[in-house]
Image (cartoon, rainbow, N blue to C red):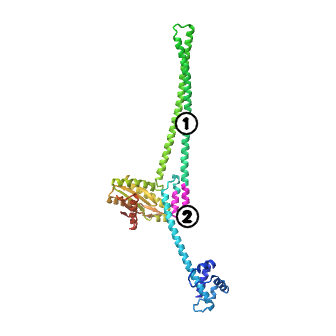
Amino acid sequence: MLTDLFRKLHLLMQQSSIDEELLSLVFDPKSNDKSSVDIEAFKQQLSAFLHEKDSENPFTQFPDNSNDKQPSSLSGFILQLDTLVTRYLQINQSLSAKLEHCEETQNKLIATYKKRLVTLYKDINIHYKLHARLNELTIALEEVNTSEALLISIEDVVILLLKSIDHEKENSKFFLETIHQEIDDINDINQITKKLSETSAQQRQQWDKSTNKNLQNLSDISQRIDLSINDDKILTNEIAQLNLAMSDKAHFDQQMLAAQQAQIQKLASKLNHIEKEAKSYHSQLAQQKLINMQDSLTKLPNRKALEKEFESRFQYAKSSNQSLWVVVADIDHFKMINDQYGHSAGDKTLQVIASSLGKCLRNSEFIARFGGEEFVFLIPNLSTAAINNVLNRVRERIKAIPFKFKNKKVQITLSLGATRVKPNDIDRQVSFDRADKALYQAKKQGRDRVTIF
C-alpha cells in the first residue's frame, strides 16, 4: 500500500510542483469533503517526512508488502497522501476532459470556417493573374488544422484581394489617363482649328473690303461714258488689283482648306485611335468577365456562372412549364487520390473528367464545376427515363477512362444525384438541395450510381 502511494507521489512530483496553487486545487476550501486537509500543515509534514528518506530512491525504504504494518504515526499522513493523489488524478481527468472538449469545439469551429473560406474562394472575383495564387490558397486550406493556421489563411486571402484591387485600379487608372490624354489632344486640335477659322475669317473680311472698294471704283468709272487716258489707266489698274486680290484669295483659301483638312484628318485619326482604345478596353473587360466566370483549372464555367445560368433557366422552366433537370455529380473517393498520389494527380484527374463531361453533353445542356470534385448539370426537356439513361452513360464513360498514377491503374467512378424542378419549388436552392440529397443517397448506397428524386 505504502509503496504504491509513493510511486503515485513520485509521478505526481514529476508532473508538477507541489505548491500552494496545486494543493488549493486538490483541497478545495469550499468543498464539503470531510477529507479536506490543512494545506500548510500537510506541506510541512510532507517535507519533514521526505527529508528523512533517501532522496534519490525513496521506494527502497518501503518494501512492496501489503501486510507490513506501518507506524501508527504515519497513518494520518498516509490517508492524507492517498487523498492528495486521488484528488489530483480526479482533477487531472477533469482538466483533460475539459481540454478535450475545448479541442473538439475548436476543431468544429476550424472546420466551419474552413468551409466558409472555401465558399469565399469560389465566389470572389479577382484579377486573372492572381488565379494561380488563389488555387494555391485553396489547396493549402485543406491542410489547415489549427486556429493560427486558419488566421494565416484569412490574412493571405485578404492580401490577395488587396492585390486584385490594386491591379484593377492600375488598369482603370491607365485607361483613364489614356482617355484624358486623347481628350486633351482633341481639345488642342479644336483650338488650332478654331484659330485657323478665325484667321481665315479676318483675311476674308479684308479681301472682301478691298474687293468691294475695287468694285465700287469700277462702278464709278463705268458710269463715265467718255474715258480719258487717265481714266483708262485707272480702270486698267483697278482691274489688275482686283485680279491680284482674287488670285491671292484663291491661293489663301487653298492653303486654309489644306490646313483645315490636315487638322480634320488628325482629328479623325485621334478619334479612330480612341475608338480602338475603347474597343480594346471593352475587349479586356469582356475577357476579364469571361475569366471570372470560368474555373481556372478545368476551364468549365465556375460556380458564379452556374448561379447566373441556373437562375435564368429556373425562371424559364417555371414560367414555361418545361422540364429542367438539376444534376449534382461527385467524384468518388477523390480525397484518396490527393492523399496517395498528390494534388497534381488530383488536378489532372479533375481536368480529364471535366473534359469528358463536357463532351457528353449537348449545346442546350449546361455544366459547371461547383467546387472541389463536384460538378452540376442543367439539362432541359427530358423524361425521367431519358435522364436516367443519359446520366448512366455519363457515369459509364467516366468509369471507362484509363487513369494511371505511379504506374498503377486506377478506376475512377462518379456518383450522381438528379431532380426535376417542381412547380412548388420557391427558388433554385430548393431544387439544388433536393439534387444534393439524391447525391448523398447515391453515396450512401455504395457510390458509382445514379439516384433520382
Q: Position of residue 290 (x, y in %)?
A: 46, 50
Residue on which disc 2 sits: 149
Q: Is residue 138 left or right of residue 357?
A: right
Q: Position of residue 113 (x, y in %)?
A: 50, 63
Q: Taken as a whole, is the magenta stretch helix, strand or loop?
A: helix
Q: Residue at x 52, y 72 (%)?
A: 101
- Say few, some or many: other residues with alpha carbon within 10 Å of mark 1 (under 14 / 14 to 19 / 20 or more): few
Start and end of the magenta stretch? 134-161
Is 138 inside the magenta-drawn segment? yes
Residue 139 visible in this rendered orientation of the protein: yes
Quarter the C terminus occupies? bottom left
Q: Secondary structure at mark 1?
A: helix
Quadrant assignment, res 54: bottom right
Q: Position of residue 111 (x, y in %)?
A: 50, 65
Q: Residue at x 56, y 59 (%)?
A: 155
Q: Is residue 5 left or right of residue 406?
A: right
Q: Secondary structure at mark 2?
A: helix
Residue on which disc 1 sits: 187
Q: Position of residue 322 (x, y in %)?
A: 33, 54
- Disc nearer the start of the sequence (2/1): 2
> Is 427 above or below relative to 44?
above
